[in-house]
Image (cartoon, coloured by chain):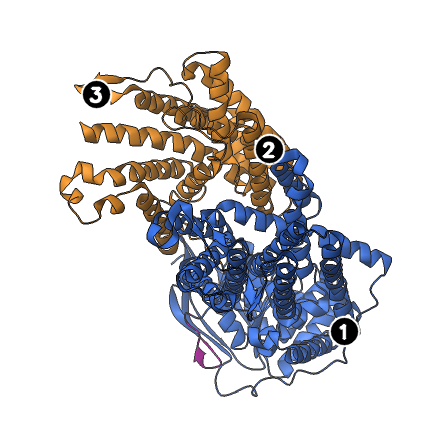
Chain colours: A blue, B orange
Amino acid sequence: MSALSLRGAATPLGLGAAILLAWPFVFASAYDHRVFALSGIYALLVIGYQFIFGHAGAFALTQGAFFGIGAYAAAILGVRYGWTLELTVIPAMLLAIAVASIVAMPVIRLESHYFALATLGISQVALLVALNWESLTGGANGIAGVPGLSFAGIEATEGMKMAVLVWAVVVVGGALAWQATRGLYGQAMRLLRADDIAAAACGVDGARLRLVAFLLSAGYGGLAGALYAHALRVVSTETLEFHVMVACLAMAVIGGRARVAGAILGAVLLVHLPEWLRDFERYYLIAYGVLLLAMIVLAPDGLIGLVERGWRRISPPSPRSTPAPIPILGRAPVRHDVPALAVVDVSKRFGGVEAVAGVSFVVRAGDIVGLIGPNGSGKTTLLNVVSGFETPDRGHITIGGDSVDGLAAFCVARSGVARTFQTPRLVDDMSALENVAAARAWRLTPSLPSAISPRRAAHMDQRARGEALGLLESLGIAEHSTRQCGGLPIAVRRRIEVARALALEPFLLLFDEPAAGLAADERDDLARRLVALAQAGRALLIVEHDMSFLLPIANRVACLEGGRLIALGPPDEVAHDPAVIAAYLGTGRAGGMD
Amino acid sequence: MLVAQLLVNAIALGAAYALCALGFVLVLNATGAVNFAQGDMVTAGGLSSVAAASVLPMPAVVLMPVVMVAVGAIGAIAAAIAYLPLKNRPAVSVFISTIALGVILQNTMLAAAGPAPRAAPPLIATRLVQVYGVALPLQSLAVICVAVLVGGGLFVLLFQTRVGQKMRATAQDRAMAAALGIDVVRVIVLTFTLAAALGGAAGVLLSNTFFVTPFDGANYILKAYIAATIGGWGSIGGAALGALLIALFEVLFPALPLIAPSLARLPAAAEIFSQTSAAIALYIALLAILMLRPQGLFGETARRRA
């Protein structure tokens, strides 16, 4: 991790620490200390929620339930066996994680609105169970007499001690969350939440990342619940009600979704809001709603986003010290004895439309195969089938001699197939360097443990950035490496996407209209680079409309019409094939009618 | 006899749920976003009819148009403050902003009406009427009739008028509708208004049989959300059918031991056939549907992440 991001992160962290240190001295009564401790408990809950909501970008409504489950677990164990926090905290976290892993099975792959509903439903079930399983949960009465907060034999039931203990946990939990998400691992999540298709094309296992984030959320939720049970010594069904979830969501949105300091800020602010608005009695909840609404409209990055933007204005970030470019060593040498890509009798239907019908061809290492055909002839569908984004109804695909039938897109990407998109799918608010580096994540920092180890993570992050810079340099766009992708011209964006594709160390590259939108000189430059890639032993399959670009560089050209392969051969032959000409001119519809 | 009464009650409940769910789906189609405050429109409708009846002691069927206009106005405000500023942001932003709006509405209603449960007047009267020799509750029959009328009116509006055509065009493709010269913002505000009025109508229909308190909205939004999901996301007919299914399940499941007395002899029958277990079973059924048929019971296209 280089200096800038450390600095960038240190600012909000320092702010959080300052609030943390100043608060107990500003407000000194024991009651205030207890309120402050409560805000620490909520901070942990929100830090956990940020994994799934802020980092993985999935709108889960289960965080309140994880809190309640943790609280009940700690309370039941505390009352029945006299266990204190040291003994109850692990079972509380494990129970929340266990519930999360069971419910994740059906819901983790669901689309956004369904995921929200499913997680809401699960929370309702948890509440109903707590209300009705009276022998275990005390029903509507809840559970009283939970052992007070203590740690390692030291009582922490008094306000100040309670605040110190809780906030010590917040510091540890916050540091872990910060470390886990600040490097490559966090960048993979950022790519996933911005664009899950691009993420899959970069070999990111979205379902797995979301699952890990969900389980982490549950663990933190359970931890916060256990602390709550021992701090308040009473647990009731209130801990499972929807307003806990709403409070957690409001804290994350108001503080900031993906920053530890945001979670702390949001929790401290909203837990103290009723104290500050005590004169307004029950109207304070209206103010609460207004604040949430105002923040989501006016400051979607939360207070911490405002603070960071203000800070950047006061002290503009110095260009991040970029590491020296590092070449990617690449995977095992390309095999020439098997085709890089073999498509065998592949068909794909959408409803009544046969988008691809019985297409077969091969692409060998060093080949550039052009894929042409009129609009709607199935070219992009074929690319999607090859790259695993669509499952063919019939036929087989082998890549480097190995069958990829039934493999998910991210697995196909990992097996050495990289692609670009008709409209480049880059993350606009990430720099060019970060966009390319994110595609190295699954190779360099593939798991949570490797992200949490500061030395390994920093090393891998450094290496990924070096390699990304090397790729950008080889494509002649190193000077754009620190710019946000959103503002870059299309020619540069296309090259960044090529660099990102190369970051996967592919031996098969799929391009979807790479020349579209490029000026003549940019097109010539791209053509030279594509030829160089093929000469280096890679196989290229290029969908393109621009014949003056494609025909000179392709070894062979395949033409689709109505989903069928109507011509395949050297560029000159195909270009003069009457069926191909007819397909483009729309006369006779040769070949597509049998 | 008993079964007929149960069925009529269930259909009445389902008809009211359906109005709420229709409003939910209209906004969903027009904006692509979940309006989480739709349930609070039901509460607002219920409390408004309580308030209107205290000023003007009339049967609720007379008060209903007034209530629908009042709650519709809340819907227009909702569009202005919780949707329009976010119309170019991800749909989740609107989900969150309508949660915030719900918090505001609930607590405003709490401040205005207090926490005590209230009951609105019946649509016409509460008594039993004889239909083919079967005694049926008049309120339930009236709820069904009114809901069918309101639903029919919605159908006419959507499919027989220019405004409805614009609404459907906007729901199909906002960008295309705008390109064709439709004032999309106006249509969306109108959709929110209509959706809230439908929610308000549901509130009038429900709040005689059931007490109304300021925090009931969460229950109704869940039902609408589930109805829209099992009916096929975005399908108007599917949502109405889904709402009916939920209500039938909610009413008939706890009544199974009454319908089939042999079930009552099962061990722990009281626990198995309780309202709570019906609710739990409903959520579990929802999860099963999401897992096995994410396109809904009647839908076609699958909706999963890449």
Quadrant of the rendered image containing residue A155: bottom right
Let me know if residue A402 is in the magenta part. yes
Percent of width and height locating residue B191: 54, 31
**Between marks 2 and 1, how big is the CA–CA gap?**
51 Å
Please check whether the numbered discs 2 and 1 fall on a single chain.
Answer: no
Residue at which label 2 appears: B78
Residue B186 is labelled as none
| Apparent side of residue B293 relative to residue A146 in the rendered image (left or right) | left
Please state the chain letter of the residue tagged with numbered disc 1 in the rendered image: A
- Tell me the CA gap for discs 2 and 3: 42 Å
- State the residue position of label 3: B135
Other-residue count near label 2 (Cα within 10 Å), few / some / many at <14 / 14–19 / ≥20: many
Mark 2: secondary structure = helix
Q: Secondary structure beneath disc 3?
A: strand
| Dot 1: element | loop
Q: Which residue is mark 1?
A: A476
Q: Residues within 10 Å of mark 1 (few under 14, many from 20)?
A: few
Asked if one can make out residue A250 in the rendered structure from this viewpoint, the answer is yes
User: x%, y% of residue B238?
Assistant: 38, 39
Q: Please name the amino acid that badge 1 sits on.
A: Gly
Q: Position of residue B236 (x, y in %)?
A: 42, 36
- Near-viewer residue (B32 or A479): B32
Q: Which residues are magenta?
A: A398-406
Asked if both marks, 3 and 1, belong to the same chain, the answer given is: no
Circles 3 and 1, Cβ within 8 Å, touching? The answer is no
Image coordinates for residue A558, horizontal then vertical, percent:
52, 69
Q: Quadrant of residue A295?
A: top right
